[in-house]
């Protein structure tokens, strides 16, 4: 693909007005671009904004003075596509080839306030080498689709952008039925179109998210709001849960009566997985993988609150576990051996705990375990089992202090277990004390 071809194809005397770049736009060109309905932006070969018209400011919320000289990708391209766009621009600069330049494209773009819009845009290149510039004309396809549907009084088919849109789009009846869906929505949900149109959005929505969605849809129907956005969960056809970002709006007839809902649906499952990973990193001990002190304190407080609210009658046990001799192992064999000792003890204890038990590393050589619905006898039996298993499977021993939590003794459990653990260590280690 030759850059000089794209500098001329379909643009008449664009070079007469643009010269070697947008800095040389003459008065007529500037007036034409400023009055254009579509947003217009120009970039140099490095991707920095050189021109920005009034429609672009209205569409994206960025004033011209705010964007000039800045990377366009940082302003309007979603984070998950920025690196790809930068690579494609660089590839065009170096080779004159790109699947984007010279074509009409559809994608989701970002506004200054963080909201997203589905858009259709064309990218053309003018010049070559250091004088190369990129020119974008951008159209908000949400407004285009809704305007077409309102004028015609139809069920909002907006075929021009519907079928090939990169995000899911659905025309939804006032009863929640999917009346028309595009291929992207089929890919997101796993349903073929003919099956999806037999369902309602209520059928797909995760139960805990349904009331909020219905409330917002009702407000939209009553005309209290013109659109809404929310994150919610869908059930895919295979039964797994997917996270989506939903933008809902309403198409009305010329008398203002509601016709259909328009839903723009973006799969954000990957982002949610990243958020869970970040939360895991914030609440897990990086060496052993069990909960850290902050998470254990949170779970202990949650259990106390639930026990008080529901007046639990059965007991829970709390272990405080100290690794005997960790300092000796670190001093004699190095911290790598000490880390192996910690991980070995963690694995041994984890294998004997239930899913409902809360296991955490709360200090350098200290662990804590919260065991709901556990009697004193069961706690002592398990503690001695753990002491014996650690002694058989690692290079050291553990001392365990036990405290009980029940009616009238929900507070101070960790402190009581700490005192009991001290007594177990005072007796020589490798044993159990309490409750």
Image (tube, rainbow, N blue to C red):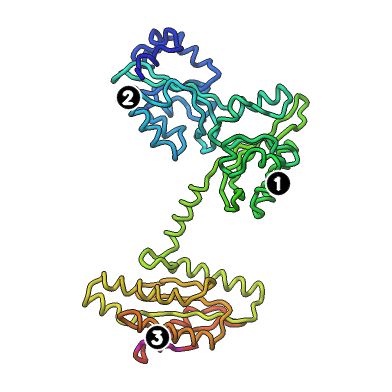
Q: Residue at x 37, y 32 (%)?
A: 86
Q: CA distance from mark 3 to mark 2?
A: 68 Å
Disc number for residue 214: 1
**Which span of residues is magenta-colored?**
429-433
Tag 1's secondary structure?
Answer: helix
Nearest the eye: 124 or 316: 124
Q: Which residue is mark 2?
A: 93
> In the orientation shown, which residue stands out farthest toward the left?
332
Corner quadrant of residue 374: bottom right
Decide: is 321 above or below 298. Answer: below
Mark closer to the observer (1, 3): 3
Question: If you read the primary sequence from the N terminus, does the residue marked by circle 3 or circle 2 appear first?
Answer: 2
Residue 150 position within the rendered picture, expressed as x and y whole percent measured from the top left: 70, 25
Where the N terminus falls, by quadrant?
Answer: top left
Decide: is 242 above or below 23. Answer: below
Tag 2's secondary structure?
Answer: helix
Q: Which residue is mark 3?
A: 388
């Amino acid at each position: 693909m030759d850059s000089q071809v794209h500098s001329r194809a379909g643009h008449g005397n664009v070079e007469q007005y643009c010269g070697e770049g947008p800095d040389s736009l003459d008065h007529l060109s500037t007036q034409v671009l400023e009055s254009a309905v579509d947003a217009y932006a120009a970039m140099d070969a490095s991707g920095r904004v050189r021109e920005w018209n009034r429609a672009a400011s209205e569409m994206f919320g960025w004033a011209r003075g705010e964007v000039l000289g800045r990377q366009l990708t940082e302003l309007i391209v979603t984070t998950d596509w920025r690196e790809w766009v930068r690579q494609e621009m660089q590839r065009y600069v170096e080779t004159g080839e790109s699947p984007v330049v010279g074509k009409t494209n559809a994608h989701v773009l970002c506004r200054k306030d963080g909201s997203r819009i589905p858009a259709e845009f064309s990218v053309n290149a003018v010049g070559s080498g250091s004088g190369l510039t990129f020119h974008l004309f951008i159209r908000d396809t949400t407004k285009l689709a809704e305007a077409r549907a309102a004028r015609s009084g139809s069920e909002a088919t907006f075929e021009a952008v519907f079928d090939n849109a990169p995000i899911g789009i659905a025309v939804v009846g006032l009863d929640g039925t999917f009346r028309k869906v595009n291929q992207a929505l089929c890919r997101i949900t796993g349903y073929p179109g003919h099956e999806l149109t037999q369902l309602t959005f209520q059928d797909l929505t995760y139960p805990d998210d349904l009331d909020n969605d219905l409330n917002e849809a009702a407000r939209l129907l009553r005309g209290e709001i013109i659109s809404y956005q929310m994150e919610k969960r869908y059930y895919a056809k295979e039964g797994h849960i997917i996270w989506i970002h939903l933008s809902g709006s309403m198409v009305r007839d010329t008398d203002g009566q509601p016709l259909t809902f328009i839903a723009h649906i973006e799969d954000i499952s990957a982002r949610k997985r990243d958020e869970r990973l970040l939360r895991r990193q914030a609440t897990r001990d990086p060496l052993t993988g069990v909960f850290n002190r902050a998470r254990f304190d949170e779970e202990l407080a949650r259990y106390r609150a639930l026990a008080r609210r529901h007046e639990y009658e059965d007991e829970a046990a709390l272990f405080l576990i100290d690794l005997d001799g960790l300092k000796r192992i670190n001093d004699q064999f190095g911290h790598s051996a000490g880390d192996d000792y910690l991980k070995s003890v963690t694995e041994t204890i984890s294998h004997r705990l239930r899913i409902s038990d809360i296991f955490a590393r709360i200090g350098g050589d200290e662990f804590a375990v919260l065991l709901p619905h556990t009697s004193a006898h069961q706690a002592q039996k398990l503690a001695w089992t753990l002491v014996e298993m650690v002694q058989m499977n690692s290079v050291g021993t553990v001392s365990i202090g036990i405290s009980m939590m029940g009616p009238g003794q929900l507070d101070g459990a960790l402190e009581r277990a700490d005192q009991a653990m001290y007594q177990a260590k005072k007796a020589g280690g490798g044993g159990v004390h309490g409750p």
